[in-house]
Image (cartoon, coloured by chain):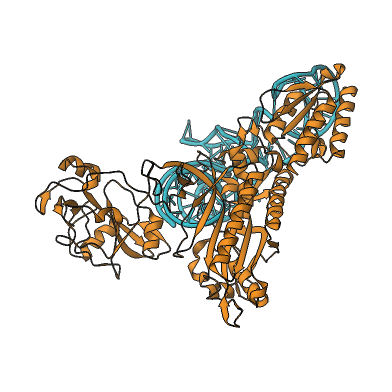
Chain colours: A orange, B cyan
Amino acid sequence: MKMSKMFVQTMREFPSDAEVVSHKMLVRAGYLKKLTSGVYNYLPLMWRVLKKVENIIREEMDRAGAQELLMPFVQPKELWEESGRWNAYGGELMRLKDRHGREMCLGPTHEEIITAIARDILKSYKQLPVNLYQIQSKFRDERRPRFGLLRGREFIMKDAYSFSTSQEELEKEYKNMWEAYTRIFKRCGLETKAVQSDSGAIGGSVSHEFMVITDTDAGENDVFYCDCGYATNSNHAVSKLPEAKIEGDWSEAKIVDTPNTKSIEELCDFLNIPPTLIVKTLVYIVDKKPVLALIRGDKPVEETKLMNAVGGLDIRIATEGEIDEMMAVNGFDSERGFIGPKGLKEYNGYPITVVADETVKDLKNFVIGVNKKDVHGVGYNWGTDVDLPQIVTDIRLAQAGELCPECGKPLKVTRGIEVGNIFQLGTKYSKPMNAVYLDQNGKTQPYIMGCYGIGVSRTAAAAVEAHHDEFGIKWPLAIAPYHAVVIPVSTKDELQMKVAEDIYKTLLKHGVEVVLDDRDERAGVKFKDADLIGFPYRITVGKGIADGLVEFKARNEEQSINIKPEDAAEIIVTAVNEIK
RNA sequence: CGGGAUGUAGCGCAGCUUGGUAGCGCACUUCGCUUGGGACGAAGGGGUCGCACGUUCGAAUCGUGUCAUCCCGACCA
């Protein structure tokens, strides 16, 4: 490719609306152009990168025995009603109507479609197991698109679906995909960590997320991990707590004055006790229904866990207005900071559900709100002074410093970008959609399913997050848009031009994807662009050619070397052959 | 959805308070000069100032509405 003809426009400055590195770099270097919020044009450079990521995925999925197909982007409402997700999916599902008023949606994922295809074709146990995948644009109407390709509304995804006859067979395929994913991300030049993750409203299912570890804002997930190998998303973390004082010194239960102690901190100061002796009561609204969460005073609530504990789909903390109203409805004159579970019965037409975190179960002689302003109950105990709620489960947000549930050492925390996930679905879709086959005994059985996703465009962006410096992108060779650039310092120097063209042609002949920067620009401009775009290798043909030497530089190394053109070419050809 | 901000040329911005010819830098075209880390000079091309309505002799500027975009909090590849 001649640089003078390449469809690319680099910019001198970063775009003002980009926040994270990958977004800034990809726009400035001419890979991306935004069309509308969360929707991007993939310009030629970007598309080359995406195709490379796709091809790595294809090779590894095929090697793992999966078969590629392509399903429609637009899907009919009917199938989504069969699975029950037309109502359950929420605002992210982009719904639309055709000219006849039939309701459709843009595919955010394809469980319904693949299940509908499978049930028509996979009739016998002899055809199973099967794993089918596709690579395609998806659309999710995100509440808040941001971070460029890391959280777009339209994005490219590889989604795979497996159909098995038993849990064992599913687990085998799950492991198979785990290994394929490990290879895929490694080939893309990414270090990933597989972490346990929340499986949403589907209880009991197993799922893992593949995280690119990056301690920047671009990592939207907190990952807890331990040297022993335990690793988990914060929304799924279970941890052991270090020893703490959980028994108060009061000899009897009583109500004491605690003026102006709306926060745990103020209450601790006033009573001169550690927060571990307090049962904190938080008010949430889950799908419009009121939920009280009881948790130890020093610990935050993990809202996803709480939501799952009551089987909800949407959760938010209640407003002060709602809390005031809830107090009034139940006959109390109180406010935030003094709430307790005792005596709260209903709100908003629903009974109040109370969920206690496991941490509060063992507290003795503790402090708790009694729904009266400026007082608290102290020396309280479960059963005698206040009832332990029906639901006692883990709703706690793990924090750094807590202990690994498997080996007991302190957990570490870091941030990660989720680039893939694997999921044991079981019969979640096959049962309601009546997707069945006949087993050896001629009996009807639902498929045992799994699904496996990779964010293709997100993976490319994650690679930029992981590999860049202040001057631009440092693509891993396997997914770089081009392997190398050849720069003649002066296009008017005939010898330089001739040598540069010779090297260019030699590299092309050996299968290297190479760009010849034949623009009549000053050398500085070409170097800046080369660094910004991120070509892994650069050969500069300058004055040194009088001695038969060119400058060779790898983007990820500081130093350049002066060597013979044929030697430079050989290094590149060798490196390129290695990644093939 | 709640809270905060911004819409002026492809990109980055000024002008708005105090209404009166639409500007600057980069990018783009031509010429000259220059050629190892985003040179310089000259001459050019490109904008219904997000949109609508209103106030006014006159609106980028004032008012109302509307749309879009971005940032901070709850979901996901």
Along the line of sight, the residue nearer the viewer: A248 or A440: A440
* Residue A473 in the image, given as x and y percentages of width and height: 65, 35
Classify residue A389 as left or right of residue A520.
left
Along the line of sight, the residue nearer the viewer: A551 or A442: A442
- Image height of B32 relative to A126, above or below: above
* Residue A427 in the image, given as x and y percentages of width and height: 53, 71
Looking at the rendering, which quadrant does residue A435 occupy? Answer: bottom right
Q: Residue at 88% x, 35% y: name it.
A: A505
Quadrant of the snapshot with the N terminus of chain A: top right
* Residue A13 in the image, given as x and y percentages of width and height: 63, 33
- Could you tell me if residue A262 is visible in this image? no
* Residue A56 in the image, given as x and y percentages of width and height: 70, 50
- Could you tell me if residue A216 is visible in this image? yes
Quadrant of the snapshot with the C terminus of chain A: top right
Q: Residue at 46% x, 50% y: name it.
A: A233
Classify residue B13 as left or right of residue A329.
right
Classify residue A578 as left or right of residue A283.
right
- Image height of A507 relative to A384, above or below: above
Along the line of sight, the residue nearer the viewer: A503 or A74: A503
- Residue extending furthest toward the front: A440
Count of marks overlaid on the render? 0
Q: Residue at 72% x, 51% y: name it.
A: A55
Looking at the rendering, which quadrant does residue A506 occupy? Answer: top right
Looking at the rendering, which quadrant does residue A484 occupy? Answer: top right
